[in-house]
Amino acid sequence: MNCFKAYLILLSVVFSLPLVSHSQELPPVLTFSPKDYQADNQNWSITQGFNNYIYIANNIGLLEYDGEHWNQYPSPNQSILRSVFFHDQKIYTGSYREFGFWEKQQSGKLKYHSLSEDSIDFIGADEQFWNIEHLDNWIIFQSLDNIYTYHIKNKSLKKITIDGSITKIYKVGGDLYFQIVDKGLFKLEEGEPALVSDHDVFKNNAIINLYTHPTDVLVQTDTKGIYTLEKEPKKWPSSSNEIDDFTVYTSLQSKNDGIVLGTISEGVVFLNPNGTIQKQITEKETLFNNTVLSVFEDKDANVWLGLDNGINCVNVNSPISVFNDDNGVLGTIYASLVFEEKLFIGTNQGLFHRQLNNPKADFKFVEGSKGQVWTLREANGYLLCGHNNGSFIFSEDEFRQISDLLGTWCFKTIPEQPDLLLQGNYNGLSVLKKTNEGWVFRNRLDNFDLSSKFVEFSSSNEILIDHEYKGVYRLLVNSSFTEVDTVYQIKKLDKGLYSSLVKFKDTIYYAQKKGVWRFDSKQNEFLKDDFLSRLYSENVYTSGKLSTTSGEIGLWSFNKNSIDFTLQGKINNSFRLASIPITSDIRGAMVGYENINHIGDNRYLLGLTQGYVVIDYEKFLDSNINESLHLTSVKYWQTGKEASVLDLGTSHELKNKTNNIHFNFSVPYFEKYFISEYQYRLKGFIEEWSSWDEKHEVAYNNLPFGDYEFQVRARIGERYQTETKSYKFTINRPFVFSNIMLLVYLILLTLLFFIIHKVYQRYYKKQKLELQYQANREIELKQLESQQEIMQVKNDQLKQDIESKSRELAASTMSLIKKNEFLGIIKDQLQQSKPLSPNAKKVIKIIDKNINNTDDWKMFEEAFNNSDKDFLKTMKSKHPSLTPNDLRLCAYLRLNLSSKEIAPLFNISTKSVEVKRYRLRKKMDLPREIGLTDYILEI
């Protein structure tokens, strides 16, 4: 029982042992802290399931990782989840007195189904299920005391009672092995334990795993290494015991027959197929914790580590190797070079080197090189080092200074003078000369003192220099290279921060934010290179630094989302552009000082601020990305309320108020340096694709009603792009625009149109009537006008008649007056003859009779009535007391005759007329202030 007790202690105690780690180039490692996945520290088991997502048994439940974000499903009975296993679209899990499986729902969420709930009575009081395996049609659940088998087809559950305590179960080929503490190694045969070996090695040591081998089955112990499974076990490999010092808690055999050991306090150890240590990764390098509780290899050969605190994913097959300098021993790398089978690294802390073909070897500091190293160059068997303190030479492990001019940026071979090198310094240019003792300082060039960081020869005595803040200069140098004769500043060329100047394939290129220009020596000017300018765009630009290397790849540039480069054509001398999708954030290089160097085969070293990475380009080309894009969840909600989840497999109709929708999507590709980018659009709302971005979720708020189709696609660099995923949904019209309401609106609208029609009909009818009335009125008016004209004519005629009658009346009246006057004169003459003769009296009597002739009055009255109708009637009606003589007097006064003119008509004197007038006034009862004639004329 001693080994079992020790094993139990390993489950709960994290040993704190001193770590020993050599500097080494390691595969990239993804790190997830408990804060990242929002769960507890310990992770006991790992598997890969639906859509190639990763599932992890954590202290508080099941974790799901889709390549972009984590989901958490609480443990069914709130206990620690110890085991997880994927088979046939089900995720099986085991915990304290509970085991079952999870199924994926249409919404993308998992739903749990218990298998042990109905059998809880025959599960031990303290059983926890630590391991799950699949064998034929059975799912095997293992606790420390018993084994339970679940038949997949008939759903039956069987308990296999074990006499003793079990540490783990191991599947090898078609057999299931397990260790019974202090009894040895067993396997299941016909549902019962069968002893395989009771050798002391297998009785007294905790067995961690079993591996297949071409000739043997290998047994992994916790502290004693690996043994062969045979009657007399032998250590494996027989030539080495280097893994015996590790305390192994978990392990696996990888697809390439290598072995991965998860240890207590010493990280993870990788063994090659022959059993020797290939690499070890600990917390000192990149692990989040040194105690490994679970190990799993996914379909892309990534090794997942469930740690005592956190999770790691080791990209074992990555074309990228990483040298981490988290402790700052090397510093920021500015230059690298392979020289005499050694890898030299120039950093801000000095010059370091190690053997090129021994990645495990430590870097050694070159004595005397402390300080900033800017550049390294091999020249005629010597290593030249451009340093902040000047120029140095390294040969036969000797490092000595050859120039004390401060700051050497670069070394350039002078055309046609192979024994001379031109140096670009902080303050101008200088020349080195090769001698029998190596390179020595010769002279400084006069007449130019600007910092010369980027220097290239355009001809044997013409130099181009780029100064980031002042621009590009063209220098003409004398033949002896002692002074600069002429300095031209190329003003047509834009200057820019992080710009650079480089010679590639005998052409000088200048690069900055707006593109790449090539120097035309015939025209002595820079011309825009449209092809290479495709390396840059303003939205991805980080640095204009161009680097050149030997090998298939020639020219490198460094952008926000990738490292771009040119590839040499296989048939002709042309080249094409390609890229590696390593973002600027991940690579962590010093902006403006990016450096890359070919170190052999197709391997390229990229200097970073904390170490370096090595890119195996051939391996990169051979790597195959075959991951699908998945919509992981679709949520919708009403503003101010909780979100709900939609099924992923069908389209949906949403109520108008729930017009906010959120999409999550991912590509389950677990590579640290190669980041997935996404592009999406919502047809029916935004037709244009978004720009490529690492953002793996998007929300649309307050969408109007209508039909929509969300489309998303992904890419990983330029070599892989997924098919487009789509999701259709409809946001219904609001109730006020629903079909019922539209029918109501249609009825109301029809009714409204009918009413309007009737109103307009009445209106137009009224208008018609009014028009008819106006037309009739106009006709009537015209008729009236015609009648008025006729009446006017008649009136004029009547007036003429009246005037005529009046003239006749006046003439008649005047004739009567003249007649009476004449008769009066005759009468007077006759009366003057005394005595009167009888004849005279007879004549006078005739005269008087003639003067008072009533026929004359009747004739006058008739004429007067024709001229002034109803006057006499009116006078009679107003003044009934008037006599005919009074009316006669009124008629004469109406004609405006004077008393003198009236007297003859009455055959009386004028005085008598006045008396008559007086009496008439009294009968009429006229006031004194009203004239009789005026009154009569006004009637």
Image (tube, helix red, strand yellow):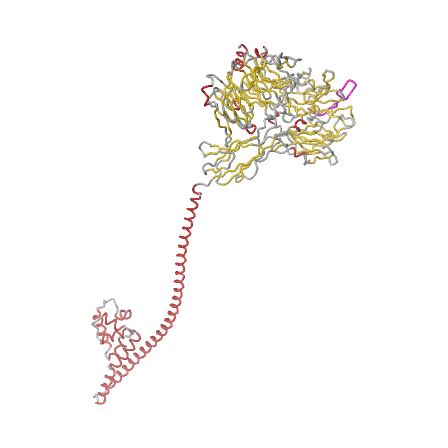
Let me know if residue 411 is in the magenta part.
no
Residue shown at the point (71%, 16%) measured from the top left = 399
Q: Give the quadrant of residue 869.
A: bottom left
Q: Give the quadrant of residue 579.
A: top right
- Residue 441: x and y, percent? 75, 20
Q: Closest to the observer: 669 or 537?
A: 669
Question: Is residue 264 something one can see in this rendering?
Answer: no
Q: As drawn, is 606 to the left or to the right of 826?
A: right
Question: Is residue 718 something one can see in this rendering?
Answer: yes
Q: Main SS type for the magenta part? A: strand
Let me know if residue 439 is in the magenta part.
yes
Q: As drawn, is 138 to the left or to the right of 555?
A: left
Q: As drawn, is 727 to the left or to the right of 473?
A: left
Q: Closest to the observer: 575 or 816?
A: 575
- Residue 519: x and y, percent? 71, 33
Q: As drawn, is 503 to the left or to the right of 243?
A: right
- Residue 515: x and y, percent? 65, 34
Q: Which residues are magenta?
A: 427-443
- Residue 36: x and y, percent? 53, 24
Q: How many marks?
A: 0
Q: Give the quadrant of residue 454.
A: top right
Q: Closest to the observer: 397 or 710?
A: 710
The C terminus is located in which quarter?
A: bottom left
